[in-house]
Image (cartoon, rainbow, N blue to C red):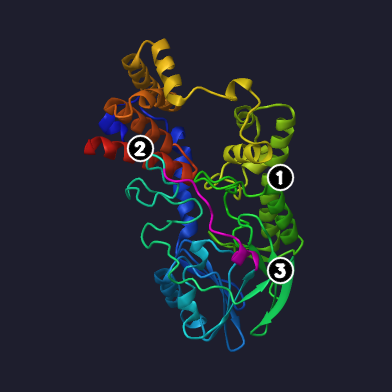
């Protein structure tokens, strides 16, 4: 840990790192295995950032999602072995995220399969994310191996083999509206438009086998409604409606886009119900608080999952968090202004920081107080104090060192992989800039 080289804090209790250890344990979800879901349906888990589903049909195969890139796709073809029979007669994209659509050319080969998706896939542009700030990276793609655990719903996101569009093939068959029933290679299935994690998300329902492939509308983590990499809120009301559609199917097996499948009718129902209720209760509580005039900071402290939902294995905060969902819902429904007139035209950050430093007795005194906060394990407070220093003196090496230590300590206590990765990559960036200077 950075603390060993930047200064010492008092010994940590085991409970302080319970979240980190739970995140470590979650990596078992990504162990490589081809899992037989039911007769003629197989899922390749752990070979890429997302799962690939193989459906055996008459005289050929159907592939749902295609992994992140051609390298991973070739490894999955090998892992399927003789269960994978050419020709590939169809490829179905649940959605257009690169970790699901980057290896299509390998599965297609020279078979010239039809490629299915919802029409929205062609109409939606690429996600508009925020540019990097101080080296922060939610996926930890360049984080040192000894600091990296996983990427929340996948073992790694482009760390070994980058996600590319090299193997993407555009859809040849699309549908509009709610759903379309098709028969491919003797297998009848329903393609259901289920906007949620992405606007084009399509669930595949194979009624004859009781198999549901929900894409990324279900993950074994609290959903990432408001990603910290700078995306718009993923509409919770549409997501809830999509989960209701899937619950009505009464599936026996569910092969989601990440982590290990859910097997058994009761467990699938519990998983989808918990997921829907986990989104709905946060939405309802947040909207009720907004009507009462509460600020985002108020709501983050007050909006919680029920004790039962908070224990659900499907709502642990590995990827999204309740707090980020609250902030995203607030901003999306009522905008940036929190209702406090002081915040209509705030002072520029540098001017505010200078006044705060003067009031606190000067820059050196604030740095000393930040060191004391580190010793007292008040890591968030230390980082906030140092931000005032860096707003006035962005090259201050002592301040960068303290902030890096505070962020590292915060990162090491996270259950959320994207928060951990962002804290630690920012800390590493600050230290790197210090060494370069």
Q: Residue at x 38, y 39 (%)?
A: 134
Where is residue 327? Give x, y as percent: 60, 37
By secondary structure, the bulk of the magenta-drawn segment is best described as loop
Q: Give residue 373's quadrant in the image.
A: top left
Q: Give residue 226's quadrant in the image.
A: top right
Quadrant in the picture for the N terminus: top left
Where is residue 303? Give x, y as percent: 65, 34
If you read the primary sequence from the N terminus, does the residue marked by circle 3 or circle 1 appear first? 3
- Report the residue marked by disc 3: 176
Q: Extreme bottom residue here? A: 59
Q: Secondary structure at mark 1?
A: helix
Q: Which mark is residue 280?
A: 1
Q: Which mark is residue 33?
A: none
Circle 2 packing at 10 Å, graded few (<14), some (14-19), many (20+), is: many
Q: Is residue 238 left or right of residue 412?
A: right
Q: Residue at x 49, y 42 (%)?
A: 415
Circle 1 packing at 10 Å, graded few (<14), some (14-19), many (20+), is: some
Task: Tell me the CA gap for discs 2 and 3.
Answer: 46 Å
Residue 130 included in the magenta stretch of the image: yes
If you read the primary sequence from the N terminus, does the residue marked by circle 1 or circle 2 appear first? 1
Q: Is residue 98 left or right of residue 394?
A: right
Where is residue 195? Give x, y as percent: 67, 58
Where is residue 112? Give x, y as percent: 53, 84
Residue 118, compared with residue 134, is above or below; it is: below
Start-end of magenta stretch:
119-132
Residue 67, compared with residue 312, is above or below; it is: below
Residue 357, compared with residue 110, is above or below; it is: above
Q: Is residue 122 visible?
A: yes
């Amino acid at each position: 840990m950075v603390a060993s080289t930047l200064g010492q804090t008092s010994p940590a209790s085991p409970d302080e790192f319970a979240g980190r250890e739970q995140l470590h344990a979650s990596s078992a979800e990504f162990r490589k295995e081809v899992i037989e879901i039911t007769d003629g349906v197989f899922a390749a888990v752990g070979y890429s950032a997302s799962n690939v589903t193989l459906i055996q049909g008459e005289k050929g195969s159907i592939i749902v999602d295609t992994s992140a890139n051609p390298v991973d796709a070739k490894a999955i073809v090998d892992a399927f072995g003789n269960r994978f029979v050419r020709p590939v007669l169809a490829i179905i994209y649940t959605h257009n995220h690169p970790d699901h659509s980057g290896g299509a050319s390998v599965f297609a080969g020279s078979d010239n399969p039809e490629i299915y998706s919802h029409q929205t896939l062609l109409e939606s542009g690429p996600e508009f994310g925020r540019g990097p700030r101080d080296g922060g990276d939610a996926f930890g793609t360049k984080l040192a191996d000894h600091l990296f655990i996983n990427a929340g719903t996948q073992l790694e996101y482009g760390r070994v083999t980058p996600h590319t569009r090299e193997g993407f093939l555009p859809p040849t068959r699309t549908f509009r509206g709610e759903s379309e029933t098709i028969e491919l290679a003797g297998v009848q299935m329903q393609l259901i438009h289920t906007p949620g994690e992405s606007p084009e998300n399509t669930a595949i329902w194979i009624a004859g086998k009781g198999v549901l492939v929900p894409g990324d509308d279900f993950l074994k983590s609290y959903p990432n409604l408001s990603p910290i990499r700078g995306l718009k809120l993923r509409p919770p009301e549409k997501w809830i409606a999509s989960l209701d559609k899937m619950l009505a199917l009464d599936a026996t097996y569910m092969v989601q886009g990440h982590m290990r499948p859910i097997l058994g009718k009761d467990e699938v129902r519990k998983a989808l119900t918990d997921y829907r209720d986990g989104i709905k209760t946060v939405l309802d509580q947040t909207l009720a608080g907004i009507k009462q005039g509460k600020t985002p900071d108020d709501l983050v402290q007050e909006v919680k999952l029920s004790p039962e939902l908070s224990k659900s294995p499907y709502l642990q905060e590995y990827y999204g968090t309740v707090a980020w969902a609250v902030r995203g819902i607030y901003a999306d429904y009522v905008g940036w202004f929190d209702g406090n007139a002081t915040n209509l035209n705030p002072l520029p950050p540098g001017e505010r920081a200078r006044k705060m430093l003067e009031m606190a007795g000067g820059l050196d005194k604030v740095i000393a107080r930040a060191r004391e906060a580190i010793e007292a394990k008040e890591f968030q407070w230390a980082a906030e104090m140092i931000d005032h220093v860096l707003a006035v003196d962005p090259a201050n090496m002592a301040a960068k060192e303290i902030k890096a230590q505070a962020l590292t300590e915060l990162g090491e206590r996270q259950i959320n992989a994207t928060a951990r990765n962002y804290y630690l990559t920012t800390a590493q960036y600050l230290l790197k800039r210090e060494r370069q200077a």
